[in-house]
Structures are given as structure tokens and as C-alpha cells.
Image (cartoon, rainbow, N blue to C red):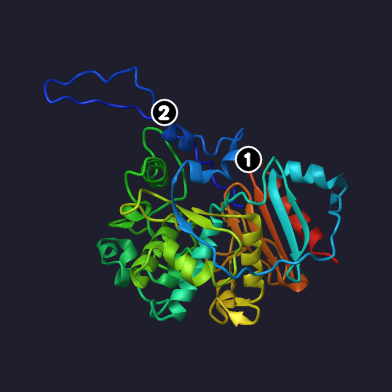
Amino acid sequence: MIHRPALRLLAPLLLAATAMSAPAAAPTDIPVDPVIQMREHWLDADINAFNFRHSADMFETRAVPHGDSVRALPDGRTITPPPFQQGSVTYSYDDWARRTYTNAIIVLRDGKIVFEQYRNRSRPSDRFISFSMAKSITSLLIGIALDQGKIASLDDPAGKYVPELRKGAYGDVTIRQLLQMRSGVDYDERYDFGEKPSVAALIHRHAVVLNEERFADRAVGIGRAATPGSRFNYATLDTAVLGWVLERATGQSLAAFTTAHLWQPAGMENDAFWIADGPEGKGRELSGMGFNATLRDYARLGQLMLDDGLRDGKPVLPRDWIKQATRMISFAQPTPLGGRGYGFQFWQLDDQPGAYTALGLAGQFIYVHPQSRTVIVKLSHYPLPEPPHVMAETLAYFLQLTKP
């Protein structure tokens, strides 16, 4: 991963009072809003194993209900997880799972469950935060909208669908460039709080925690740092713009479009939800980090992608969209985020031919390994900053799990 700088949690927010007459000192006996406090402590390492499956209790949400027809996930030949081996080091499976902060994990082989485990008092009914796995889901929705003709071309500029963006650098960035994280806008995925907070920190505070603005608002009028398409720069703001484009192009909220054209046609078993940056009528779904679903439904999503968008032989995703979306542009040199290449909001993390990953902060994975017809979903609770061993040990064990 994506050694992303930690999203340092906000200091307690100061409450101010104003009066119609002379200025008065702020009262000191009013506690901070407890909902804001919960959001500020969402990522705290000592409680995130619990928090990451209780986002609906902390944030505004938009429902993504399941349909009547559920895609079966039959049991396959059960495997016993092998010991983890790397060089001269061997750990038991349980030690590996704890070292890599596992909340829940499932392994599918040929569409059948061969291993499934819930840890830390998590349950099959829990809906876990995706963090940036949501970016890959947004990519699937872009493909569907393109296939429906709601988006005319991936080479259309974002400003065609969201005229407000024409005021700044995003206006003539194409949808393709947004999908590839090559917008060229002046934005760094750094969460620097303090006296001079970064743009990403300001967005996190004012949109995600306080719901005072929309996540994509700061895309309006933003400046340019590089020619669009010329360089990779991981930016959640790019995916927020994609979500805004989807909303305008389809005439539907992201949640409604997800429900009608992905979640229900794919045969998901449980309701999912998007976190939003404000209440109904004001907020917008967080397309870059806010999706929540059960472990098994994330596995169904991975199987859908492995099956090239088909469910029981019928298309849910456009033909060849997965091939397009996972056609990686290799990194010419190491990036601060790690990885080997990037497609349309999907990562190439290892050297396995054709393998790709939907990846989220703090160790959320949908790992697809086409050669072995394996899908692995691992939902984690890494502390931040991310311990240096967890990515290498996770990927090495995934490879062990793909073996017959």
C-alpha cells in the first residue's frame, strides 16, 4: 500500500458563541458534540477493529438495498489455512492473521467458499468500511454508465457533465484521466493538520467529519500542477469528481444508481450503504472511500469481476470493462504509495500475471487471481501509519492461498 500518511485525527473542535450585542467569551462548559468526537476517533488503532464495521452509527448514510434474487455462494472443498512462510520465518495462520490485523477473511475458488473467518467479535451480518475499495466500485459504475450511453466517451472532459468544474483545472480533465489518477491537478494525498493544513486535511475535516461542505467542493477552481495524463498522482479528489460526474450524467444519486445497476443485478445478499458528506438533500455519497458491505457481498463483487462482469452467464458489467479497468499502466519508478501499476481505480500490487486488487486504507482488499480462479477478501484494521511488514506479509500469504 500504499504507505499513505496517517489520517491524523482532528483535535477537539472549539465551539464559539456569538451574541447580538458585544462580543462575549466562548463558554467553556459545553462539551464537544459526541458524534463529532466519534468521527474524530474513527481510525484510532485501539478501537478501529470495532469502528470499521459500525460506520452507520457515526455518519450520514445512503442505503443500497439488495434485491430478491441472490447469487449463491456454495461451499467448496474446505481448506485449512497453511502456516505463513517467508524465507526462514514461519508463523501459524492465526499468528499471521493477527500480525496483519485481520477482521474478516474469505477465500473463493471457482466461485465456491473454501475458507471464511470472522475475528474480533465480527459477524457475517456486519457491514465493513471499504475505504478506497470504493474507488474500484466507482470505476464499475462509470463503465455501466458508459455502456448505457449516459456517458458518451471516456475522453469527454469532466466539465461537460459538471459545468462548475470549468472554473479550474478539472474542467478539461477527461474521465479516462480521472480513472487513471492522472488529472494533473494541484492536490496531494497528504493529511497534514495543524496551523497550515493540506487541502486533503481540510476536506477530511470539513466534509467527512463536520459535513460543512461536500467532498468535491474544493475541486471547483483548483489549480494545475502537471499536464493532464502526464503523471500518476493518487488523489481521492479525482474519484470524488468521478462520483459527481456519475450523478450528473445519470440523473441519479450514486446510491440509487449503485442499487439499480450493480448491487441488485449482481445478486447481493445484504443491503449495503454509502457514507455521505451531509444529510439528505444536501450531502453527496463519498465515492472515493465511503462504501460499506458484508464480507460475502464483497466476495460476490470479486467473483463478478473474475467472471468478466457476468452473473450466471448474463452481463451485469459491460463486456470487457474489467479488461479495460485492469489494464495497468506500470510505474516507471517507485511511487510513495507502493504498488507496481494502476488501471481504472484498480491496483497491480504483485507480479502475478493478470492479478489485480481493489484496495482500501488500513488493509481492505478484494484480491482477484485469474490464473487460479481465486478471490480473496481481507478486511483489516491496520493502525496508522501502516506497519512496514503488513503489505508484504499479506501479499505473500495471498499467493500461498492461491495454490491448489
Q: Which percent across, then down, holds residue 358? A: 60, 61
Q: Quadrant of residue 331?
A: bottom right
Furthest toward the front, the residue is 68
Q: Position of residue 268 (x, y in %)?
A: 59, 65
In this orientation, which residue lies closer to the viewer: 270 or 334? 270
Q: Quadrant of the C terminus?
A: bottom right
Q: Looking at the image, tell me whether mark 1 or mark 2 is earlier in sequence order.
A: 2
Reading the image, the residue beneath label 1 is 49
The image shows residue 325, relative to residue 131, as above or below, that is: below
Q: Residues within 10 Å of mark 2 (few under 14, many from 20)?
A: few
Residue that carries the numbered disc 2 in the rendered image: 12
In the image, residue 181 lies at what x, y percent?
47, 63
Q: Is residue 77 left or right of residue 268?
A: right
Q: Amino acid at mark 2?
A: Pro
x, y (%) of residue 169?
32, 62
Q: Nearer the viewer, mark 1 or mark 2?
A: 1
Residue 14, quarter of the rendered image: top left
Q: Is residue 179 visible?
A: no
- Marks 1 and 2 sit apart, C-alpha to C-alpha, by 22 Å
